Image (cartoon, coloured by chain):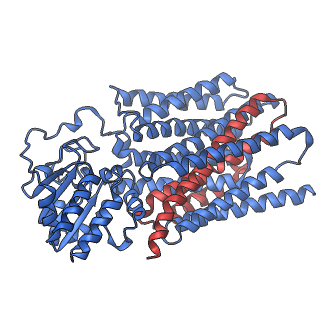
Amino acid sequence: MDSALSLFYENREFIFLIIVSIFLGIEVISNVPAVLHTPLMSGANAIHGVVIIGSIIIMLEAEPDNYFALILGFLAVVLGTLNVVGGFVVTNRMLEMFKKKEKK
Amino acid sequence: MTELLQNSILEICYLIASVTFILGLKMLSSPDKARKGNLYAAYGMGLAILATILFKEELSSDKMLNYGLILGGLVVGTVIGMRMALKVKMTAMPQMVSFFNGMGGACAAVISIVEFDHISHSGTFEMGMLIVIILGLIIGAVSFAGSIIAYGKLEGKIGDKAFPGGQVINIGLLLAILGLGIYMATMASPEPMYLYILLTLSLLYGILFVMPIGGADMPVVISLLNSFTGVAAAFGGFLYGNQAMLTGGILVGSAGTILTVLMCTAMNRSLMNVIIGSFGGGGAAAGKDSEQGTIKEITATDAAILLAYANKVSVVPGYGLAVAQAQHTVHNLEKILEDKGVEFNYAVHPVAGRMPGHMNVLLAEADVPYPKLQEMEDANGDMASTDVVLVIGANDVVNPAAETDPSSPIYGMPIIKALDAKNIIVMKRSMGKGYAGIENELFFHEKNRMLFGDAKDSLEKLIAEVKNL
């Protein structure tokens, strides 16, 4: 019991942030028209690419002779970059088409 | 630079990034701001990445290899990611999103593995830390394996496979994963071996979870896995006390979940139904195969006459149109018929194509004016006054069984009521079944005529015939 309580207490700010973010996420997209479901999914996909920051932190923390961490960290950076770059570029390509049409 | 200044700059950058993520998502929900929103979020991401590299740690000369590898990884990822994203055809968008989503999941899982190794070398685990590492690993690995299977399925490389007793195996696996995870979390310093068993089980679960789900439900699964990866990223944020990762991840986790539910609503199915009661589930597709009528074919010439002398024509586009890359051709037909005074519009089912809104993207690519795209309810309201409905490469979204046959796997899904129109022309490659793998009695209806052939070829013939009239 005590350990669970202290876990909560030590992380209370994060827990607040999480709860607020959950509601924010729901609120922010609740009025999306069906037309934009696909681009929105793709855009959200790019945003969770923020996980790449974790892979950079791993690399920064790794000892220069810890090849296990360096190799896996490098892999993680590549994977995260793929997620970010691919995600944003694909979303942009989808949305470019909406823009072209609006000029008319 | 003092440490206070450095840390402050870093946190301010993260704050800006978090705001751009929220703004970006918000703007992505409105058609005219969406593109800007995506760019804002991308700039925010770039800023967060740059700030992490520059300000997270003091630059020191003995870590040159680390910085080199980070930059190398960024360059490799950017080059490959750009190439893939720019090369992919619009019809293959859904699987591309799934693939990139899988990469994010894998990234989260790898972070957990390295961090576990890091902490196990430097002392004992705090319980909170360990829970976060374990959850990040499980969710990241499930998301990775599931996304890759979803990618393979949409590419047509992997078929639907339902194993007998698959549900029991899946639930067993899930319990094993949870059990092992909880067991690990209570240990002061768990063996790395446990972590790898957990990784293997999670990967296996991801595969078996997506494997039996029918292709028609794949968008929902991708959206669900998308929110999983968001949650995995948030656990990474927890691990490092990193607000940008936390807000970005949780935002996507909750927005993705809502989006998944919206998609299910568009198909009138519950999420549980999609996950458990899969289309591929054995004999479900049998239905009413026996009572087939006769089908009537129509020649391109007759079809052209029917279209040219109609007052109102409505096109129901489906995946077949997308596959044949016929969106430009259908736009040409629209222009020619409008010159002849025919009222022309598109009745777009919310899940036409392979993802909600997918068809709108494809038609927009062909410069089809936005007001011509009718949403399903409006289209159904106008259907009775429509002279000809032209169903191009669509099947399940016009199948009347969804309204009339409770034994049909798509029963309850809202459809475009093509039957209400005065005439129907279905353009199809063959009598093959739709994605749900069931017969469509619309094809046998007396109002209906079939025009067989590749959608693009048939449309070109129609255009030529209409011009000749």
* Front residue of this view, candidates B66 and B268: B66
The residue located at (74%, 42%) in the rendering is: B72
Residue B219: horizontal and vertical position, in percent? 41, 48
Q: In the rendered view, would you say B326 is above or below B369?
A: above
- Displayed quadrant of residue B362: bottom left
* Front residue of this view, candidates A26 and B74: B74
Residue A92: horizontal and vertical position, in percent? 54, 60
Q: In the rendered view, would you say B160 is above or below B218?
A: above
Residue B163: horizontal and vertical position, in percent? 35, 27
Name the side, left or right, on which A70 lies relative to B404.
right
- Displayed quadrant of residue B438: top left
* The C terminus of chain B sits in image quarter: bottom left
- The blue-tinted chain is B
* The N terminus of chain B sits in image quarter: bottom right
Asked if residue B235 can be seen in this view, the reply is no
Residue B91: horizontal and vertical position, in percent? 41, 51
Q: In the rendered view, would you say B397 is above or below B191?
A: below
* Front residue of this view, candidates A24 and A54: A54
* Front residue of this view, candidates B253 and A33: A33
Name the side, left or right, on which B26 lies relative to A70.
left
Q: In the rendered view, would you say B96 is above or below B203?
A: below
The residue located at (52%, 57%) in the rendering is: B255
Asked if residue B10 can be seen in this view, the reply is yes
Name the side, left or right, on which B186 lies relative to B285.
right
Look at the image and give the colour of chain A: red
The residue located at (13%, 49%) in the rendering is: B441
Residue lying farthest to the front in this orientation: B468
Total numbered labels placed on residues in the image: 0
The residue located at (21%, 77%) in the rendering is: B341
